[in-house]
């Protein structure tokens, strides 16, 4: 629990940096000592039944009933170490969660690898506060699989995924063994997209700055000499091959459809505004129209690329609430 | 308990390929040994409830609480009415059956099915309380395996496979649990005696009845259950003396013989013993009665028991478990004096009944008042008149049953003859009483003991002869053998043998039965008879005194730790994991390499391979070296991939070292010298 749980409204110290997708979580092997085991309620009921059987055997001095009771007790004890063995030595590799929109389920993805020849039975991902566990799966010897558990999200902002535990009750359900998985990094929950959507604000062609070498859909304008910083994709390789030196293709953006999404020009109250802006951003990104975003605390110049998209949505997600 | 509802298997009952029918069949198998003992309505209604549940699986909801409580109440009431209480294993099983059926009826979730599994295991124990015969134990072992397989299936939530498809896995679990179970079985401290009175375990008491109605021995005589086994120290008594005394009846009501009122007086002192004494050891099955059986007449015994004035040996408590005792008997016991009270009682007859029989007895007495003469007349009466021995006698009238038997039906078995004879003697003024017990016994040549079954039950008489005391008279033997019905002949071979008549042995069947009886005796003595006393002796013999608590605590800890030790042995796939494949492949390869040499004791595979590679043709040597390399990689790996192991085994079996070495040209090295015997 080294990363503090961060709730919405709390200041993230490095708000511009989004940890999603960047932090690589190390694979780790489940150690023997971090695997906990306890009897399940059913296990306790089984123990009660065994005690009753044992008392009956003692009362009637019935040797075969004694043997039955001891046989079942032995099986339960054996199964205890088997349940424990379902987890020890597994290689787990949690995947940092990707942002989702509020109200959607956030999939928490854990990759599991079984390096041993012992099949791992009945592996279940479970959160502390969710009653319903995921489906139990078996992991055969020398194989790997991916477990996913979806947790519901409700509000925009930083979301610290609940601590997960990986547990197993097989083969008999008498004991439950579990390990606490390392906490997943917090992720951003984008605001709910407005539904129905308002019409897009009118394009403001003049105000957007032209970035000629930015997008793919722009029209070819001509060639110019290469300058450091030009992207490799726009270098005219045939010319270079003929020995003509490095030339860069110049592009002209289409003269239309650049929009500035302005906080002040969006109707509604705070959350409604954020929802509408989110909706527009999704639509414009899908249509690949450059857009800019102007918030009281942010001014994103018009662009159309995944990074930009993510930056805008993150800014909306983390937009501070006014103090009450 | 909430957590159980949503287990890994999810909704247990709803799926198309659900384990529910399999579970129900398994439960039916669990109760099967009791179907004959339980009332038919109970078995029927339980079956109906199971079928109702199967026909209409509850879609996630159960019948309302009130209906369920009502059903439970009705079931409890019926069990109480049927069995007059809940004491004992059979009423307990009946109640458990109803509860299980109700639980099955309302089962909706995995949790319900798990509870049914628990009830099933407990009921297997209850079955064992009622019978521990080897056949029953074997059957219940199979049922336990099936239930365990079903449980595994239930927990796995598997959709594929039948309900018992996990039987192999279940067998693996049970076999691996067996060492722990056995250690616990032998060392877990046994507490003698019942903890509380749970009532009799068995369904009906074994042995002889406490009243003697006409026909009360009928059921017993047809039963083949073993009552006791006897092993004589020294030569056994002659056949005519093998009478084992049980309850004695001296009060006749006109139809029924009842035990005498003075049975608790101490035995008379004025006795004299004649002839040889017989020492023997008896192993008595749990009879649930206080009667102990002993050869006529017991004078000393090794168990807490007392002999009463009728020479009945009685234990202070009903015999609830297998009991062993030694006793000494003298077949010839004489008494001088019959107390007047006893004499009057043993002459008493109901007033007015059976006039014809009385007249006959008085007629005999008038002819010759000597007791022996009267007895002989009575016996020849049975022999000469057309009396038949049959197990299915016609019914006798209530008012004059003795007259009816002696002059009209003349068909009956030992009990009828003993009863009529005692009546005649009393009517003739000779004190007489009826004795029940067992006669003969079947010799088991394998075990060296005699088996006495319920079918050996018998009734005879004792008459008082002045100057001699009580003398045994067996009127049944007076009947002409030709008048024994064939059905009775088969059952009563023991009685007839007693009369000096041999029936032909039944060959193989008899031999099988003898072996089975011997096995049964060992089972009883050493498996079922293992208790506090035997445990103490066993532990003492291996050098442990049970006085030290620490010692058995240590034993139990070892037993409980055993599973963890087994776990260290790495048996991942049940008990089928055998030697490692790569090792076997390598050994096979080494056998084929013998013409070139065999590895020395200290030689690891790589060193051996290097030594060999110089002897082989260039390519072959390199290949062998590579194989050895792969082998040592795999062999010293913790957990090699099965595919790699398989590929290595294939490569090793494909490897051909080429034509054998030309011995003559080569000077043999030390390694080759060892290999020479194999190469030729």
Image (cartoon, helix red, strand yellow):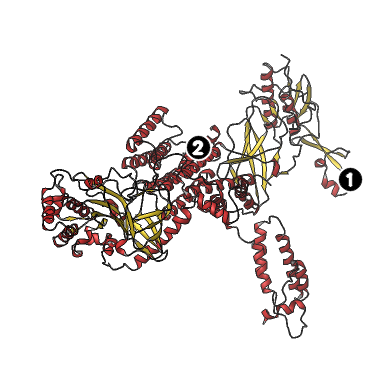
Residue B450 is drawn in which quadrant? bottom left
State whether residue B594 is above or below residue A66: below
Mark 1 to mark 2 CA distance (whole Å): 78 Å
Which residue position is annotated with label 1? Answer: A245
Q: Quadrant of the C terminus of chain B?
A: bottom right
Side of A298 where A193 appears, left or right: left
Protein chain holding label 2: B
Callout 1–callout 2 Cβ contact below 8 Å: no
Which residue position is annotated with label 2? Answer: B111
Query: SS for tag 1?
Result: loop
Q: Nearer the viewer, residue A69 or A187?
A: A69
Side of B632 where B169 appears, left or right: left
Measuring 73% from the left and 15% from the top, which residue is drawn there?
A323
Residue B274 is drawn in which quadrant? bottom left
CA neighbours of label 2 inside 10 A, class few (<14), some (14 to 19), many (20+): many
Query: SS for tag 2?
Result: helix
Residue B218 percent coordinates (x, y):
25, 52
Q: Nearer the viewer, residue B42 or A292?
A: B42
> Residue at the top extreme?
A324
Residue A213 percent coordinates (x, y):
81, 35
CA neighbours of label 1 inside 10 A, class few (<14), some (14 to 19), many (20+): few
Protein chain holding label 1: A
Q: Nearer the viewer, residue A315 or A11?
A: A11
Q: Is residue B84 visible?
A: yes
Residue A108 percent coordinates (x, y):
66, 36
Specify whether disc 1 shares its chain with disc 2: no
Residue A255 is drawn in which quadrant? top right
State whether residue A70 is above or below residue B580: above
Residue B543 percent coordinates (x, y):
60, 55
């Amino acid at each position: 629990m080294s990363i503090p749980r961060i709730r919405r409204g709390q200041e993230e110290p490095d708000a511009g940096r989004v940890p999603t997708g960047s932090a690589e979580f190390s694979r780790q092997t489940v150690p023997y000592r971090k695997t906990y085991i306890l009897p399940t309620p059913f296990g306790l009921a089984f123990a009660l039944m065994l005690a009753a059987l044992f008392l009956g055997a003692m009362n009637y001095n019935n040797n075969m009933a004694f043997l039955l009771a001891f046989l079942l007790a032995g099986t339960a004890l054996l199964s205890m170490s088997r349940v424990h063995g379902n987890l020890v030595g597994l290689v787990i590799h949690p995947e940092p969660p990707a942002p989702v929109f509020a109200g959607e389920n956030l999939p928490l993805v854990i990759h599991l690898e079984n390096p041993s020849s012992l099949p791992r039975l009945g592996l279940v991902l479970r959160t502390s506060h969710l009653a319903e566990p995921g489906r139990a799966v078996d992991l055969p010897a020398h194989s790997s699989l991916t477990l996913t558990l979806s947790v519901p999200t409700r509000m925009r902002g930083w979301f610290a995924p609940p601590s997960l535990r990986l547990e197993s009750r097989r083969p008999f359900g008498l004991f439950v063994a579990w390990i606490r998985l390392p906490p997943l990094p917090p992720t951003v929950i984008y605001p709910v997209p407005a539904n129905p959507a308002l019409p897009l604000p009118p394009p403001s062609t003049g105000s957007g700055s032209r970035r000629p070498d930015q997008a793919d859909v722009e029209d070819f304008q001509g060639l110019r000499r290469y300058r450091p910083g030009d992207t490799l994709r726009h270098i005219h390789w045939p010319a270079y091959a003929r020995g003509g030196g490095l030339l860069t293709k110049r592009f002209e953006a289409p003269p239309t459809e650049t929009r500035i999404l302005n906080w002040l020009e969006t109707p509604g109250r705070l959350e409604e505004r954020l929802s509408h802006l989110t909706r527009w951003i999704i639509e414009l990104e899908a249509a690949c129209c450059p857009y800019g975003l102007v918030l009281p605390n942010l001014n994103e110049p018009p662009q159309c690329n995944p990074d930009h998209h993510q930056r805008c949505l993150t800014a909306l997600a983390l937009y501070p609430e006014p103090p009450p | 308990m909430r957590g159980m509802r949503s287990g890994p298997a999810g909704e247990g009952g709803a799926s198309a390929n659900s384990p529910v029918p399999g579970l129900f069949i398994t439960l039916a198998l669990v109760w099967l040994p009791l179907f004959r003992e339980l009332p038919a309505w109970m078995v029927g209604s339980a079956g109906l409830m199971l079928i109702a549940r199967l026909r209409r699986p509850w879609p996630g909801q159960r019948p309302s609480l009130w209906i369920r409580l009502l059903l439970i109440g009705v079931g409890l009431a019926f069990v109480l009415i049927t069995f007059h209480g809940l004491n004992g294993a059979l009423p307990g099983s009946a109640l458990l059956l109803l509860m299980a059926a109700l639980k099955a009826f309302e089962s909706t979730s995995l949790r319900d099915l798990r509870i049914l599994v628990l009830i099933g295991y407990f009921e297997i124990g209850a079955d064992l309380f009622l019978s521990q015969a080897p056949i029953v134990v074997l059957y219940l072992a199979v049922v336990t395996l099936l239930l365990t397989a079903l449980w595994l299936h239930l927990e796995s939530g598997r959709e594929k496979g039948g309900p018992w498809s996990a039987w192999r896995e279940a067998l693996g679990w049970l076999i691996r649990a067996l060492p722990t179970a056995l250690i616990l079985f032998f060392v877990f401290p046994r507490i003698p005696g019942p903890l509380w009175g749970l009532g009799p375990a068995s369904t009906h008491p074994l042995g002889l009845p406490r009243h003697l109605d006409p026909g009360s021995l009928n059921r017993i005589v047809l039963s083949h259950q073993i009552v006791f086994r006897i092993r004589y120290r020294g030569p056994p008594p002659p056949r005519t003396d093998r009478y084992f005394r049980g309850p004695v009846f001296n009060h006749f009501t006109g139809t029924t013989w009842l035990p005498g009122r003075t049975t608790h007086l101490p035995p008379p002192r004025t006795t004299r013993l004649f002839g040889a004494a017989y020492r023997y050891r008896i192993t008595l099955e749990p009879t649930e009665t206080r009667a102990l059986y002993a050869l006529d007449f017991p004078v000393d015994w090794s168990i807490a028991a007392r002999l009463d004035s009728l020479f009945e040996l009685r234990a202070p408590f009903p015999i609830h478990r297998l009991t062993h005792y030694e006793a000494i008997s003298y077949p010839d016991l004489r008494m001088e004096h019959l107390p007047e009270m006893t004499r009057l009682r043993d002459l008493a007859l109901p007033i007015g009944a059976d006039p014809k029989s009385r007249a006959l007895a008085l007629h005999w007495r008038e002819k010759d008042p000597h007791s022996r003469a009267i007895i002989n007349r009575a016996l020849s009466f049975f022999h000469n008149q057309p009396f038949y021995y049959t197990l299915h006698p016609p019914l006798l009238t209530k008012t004059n049953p003795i007259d009816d038997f002696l002059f009209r039906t003349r068909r009956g078995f030992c009990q009828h003859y003993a009863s009529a004879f005692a009546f005649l003697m009393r009517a003739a003024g000779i004190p007489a009483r009826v004795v029940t017990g067992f006669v003969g016994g079947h010799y088991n040549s394998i075990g060296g003991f005699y088996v006495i079954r319920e079918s050996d039950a018998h009734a005879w008489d004792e008459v008082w002869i002045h100057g001699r005391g009580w003398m045994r008279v067996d009127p049944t033997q007076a009947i002409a053998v030709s008048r024994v019905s064939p059905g009775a002949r088969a059952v009563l071979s023991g009685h007839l043998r007693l009369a000096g008549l041999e029936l032909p042995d039944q060959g193989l069947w008899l031999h099988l039965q003898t072996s089975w009886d011997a096995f049964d005796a060992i089972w009883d003595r050493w498996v079922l008879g293992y208790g506090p006393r035997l445990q103490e002796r066993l532990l003492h013999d291996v050098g442990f005194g049970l006085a030290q608590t620490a010692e058995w605590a240590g034993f139990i800890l070892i037993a409980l730790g055993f599973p963890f030790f087994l776990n260290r042995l790495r048996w991942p796939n049940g008990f089928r994991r055998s030697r490692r494949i790569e090792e076997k492949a390598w050994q096979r390869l080494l056998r084929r390499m013998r013409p070139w040499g065999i590895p020395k004791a200290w030689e690891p595979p790589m060193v051996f391979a290097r030594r060999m590679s110089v002897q082989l043709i260039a390519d072959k040597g390199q290949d062998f070296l590579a194989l050895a390399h792969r082998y040592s990689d795999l062999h010293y790996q913790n957990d090699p991939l099965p595919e790699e192991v398989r590929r290595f085994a294939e490569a090793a079996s494909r490897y051909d070292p080429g034509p054998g070495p030309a011995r003559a040209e080569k000077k043999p090295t030390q390694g080759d010298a060892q290999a020479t015997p194999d190469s030729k």
